Image (cartoon, rainbow, N blue to C red):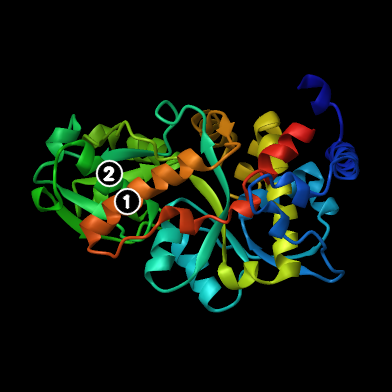
């Protein structure tokens, strides 16, 4: 790491870019890498002038910092869009080709009549030790275990990962929706910590650096957090079926999944560059907050096949369908398995 830090950022990016050229030139075509039974159906030719409209700000920044962005074999229109509501709205407006979300938006999109497919899946290797969320407890509220949630007012955002987590936490605690008071609130920004601090709710799932800031600001008033003990770590790329039906865009998406995986590894291997180049330079955080988030992330895990991923997704679907009175969905139908092996093969090839 010390040797790398002596390089200028420009020279470092050039070295990584050169590495990417070697990788792409020496690797077999990604269609051959896809590996699933229908892999041959994924188009491999990207016509000149092909454009992808991508809503994946973190990967965009990682590609920029690493120099890999210069090697993308298609044109990109980047959109500062992430999360379920924004990506679904952009898909419906035909303004976005692929987005980065957790596990719930593809389910919710399907229930609202929008056909989408997951094309990449990523997790954390130690999900319980490195959770995304903790349960924030409002000042003066006594909650020490999940069983103490009975009778509490809990922030709830149906259609988003936070909402599904609340339902899974209640299930783990042996509670039903009727045993608590679910308060529908938007989960964007710092809405949940603010709702906790103002005692609009008793409990809310909070994430990332918001956990640290919530305890720093309101800990003296009695604010606390407790772990939920569940996996909450899925991260997916997904795209509308209409986009995947376009051969040129489908081929470009295959290459994007490859570079998404390489960017993921670059972030993990270059934490200092990532903290300064992303968290500090673009997110308005200080280096200490950036280090907190890097430490919280742990190690990434891109599974070589999606069997377990689909099983977990089916369990989530079944829970949401039951609790939200939605029709059943086959989880298998939410995944385009032509893309299944691309990410891991890209990592293994290098």
x and y percent of residue 349 in the render? 79, 34
**Position above or below: 167 against 188:** above
Q: Image quadrant for the N terminus?
A: top right
Q: Residue furthest front?
A: 37
x and y percent of residue 318 in the render? 30, 52
| Circles 1 and 2 in contact, beta carbons < 8 Å | yes
**Position above or below: 93 against 183:** below
Name which residue lies at 69% across and 72% down: 246
Q: Nearer the viewer, residue 243 or 100?
A: 243
Q: Image quadrant for the C terminus?
A: top right
Residue position for label 1? 164
What whole-number distance in Å separates the C-alpha atoms at marks 1 and 2?
Answer: 6 Å
Q: Nearer the viewer, residue 185 or 96?
A: 96
Mark number displayed over residue 168:
2
Residue 284 in view here? no
x and y percent of residue 309 in the render? 47, 42
């Amino acid at each position: 790491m010390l040797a790398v830090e002596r390089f200028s950022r420009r020279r470092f990016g050039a070295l990584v870019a050169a590495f990417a050229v070697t990788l792409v030139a020496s690797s077999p075509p990604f269609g051959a890498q896809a590996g699933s039974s229908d892999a041959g159906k994924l188009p491999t030719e990207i016509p000149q002038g092909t454009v992808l409209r991508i809503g994946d700000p973190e990967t965009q920044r990682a590609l920029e910092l690493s120099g890999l962005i210069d090697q993308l074999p298609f044109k990109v229109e980047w959109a500062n869009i992430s999360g379920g509501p924004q990506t679904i709205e952009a898909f419906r407006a035909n303004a976005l080709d692929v987005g980065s979300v957790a596990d719930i938006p593809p389910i919710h999109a399907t229930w609202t009549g929008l056909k989408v497919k997951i094309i990449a899946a990523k997790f954390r290797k130690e999900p319980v030790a490195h959770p995304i969320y903790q349960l924030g407890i409002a000042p003066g509220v006594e909650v020490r275990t999940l069983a103490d949630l009975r009778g509490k007012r809990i922030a709830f955002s149906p259609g988003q990962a936070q909402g599904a987590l609340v339902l899974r936490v209640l299930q783990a605690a042996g509670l039903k929706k009727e045993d608590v008071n679910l308060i529908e609130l938007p989960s964007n920004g710092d809405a949940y910590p603010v709702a906790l601090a103002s005692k609009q709710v008793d409990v809310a799932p909070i994430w990332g650096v918001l956990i640290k800031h919530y305890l720093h600001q309101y800990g003296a008033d009695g604010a606390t957090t407790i772990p939920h003990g569940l996996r909450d770590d899925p991260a997916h790329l997904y795209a509308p079926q209409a986009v995947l039906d376009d051969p040129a865009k489908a081929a470009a998406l295959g290459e994007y999944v490859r570079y998404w995986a390489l960017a993921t590894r670059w972030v993990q291997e270059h934490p200092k560059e990532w903290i300064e180049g992303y968290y500090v330079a673009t997110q308005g955080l200080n280096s200490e907050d950036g280090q907190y988030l890097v430490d919280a992330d742990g190690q990434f895990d891109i599974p070589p096949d999606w069997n377990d991923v689909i099983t977990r997704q089916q369990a989530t679907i079944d829970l949401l369908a039951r609790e939200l009175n939605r029709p059943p969905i086959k989880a298998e139908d939410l995944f385009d398995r032509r893309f299944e092996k691309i990410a891991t093969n890209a990592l293994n090839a290098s």
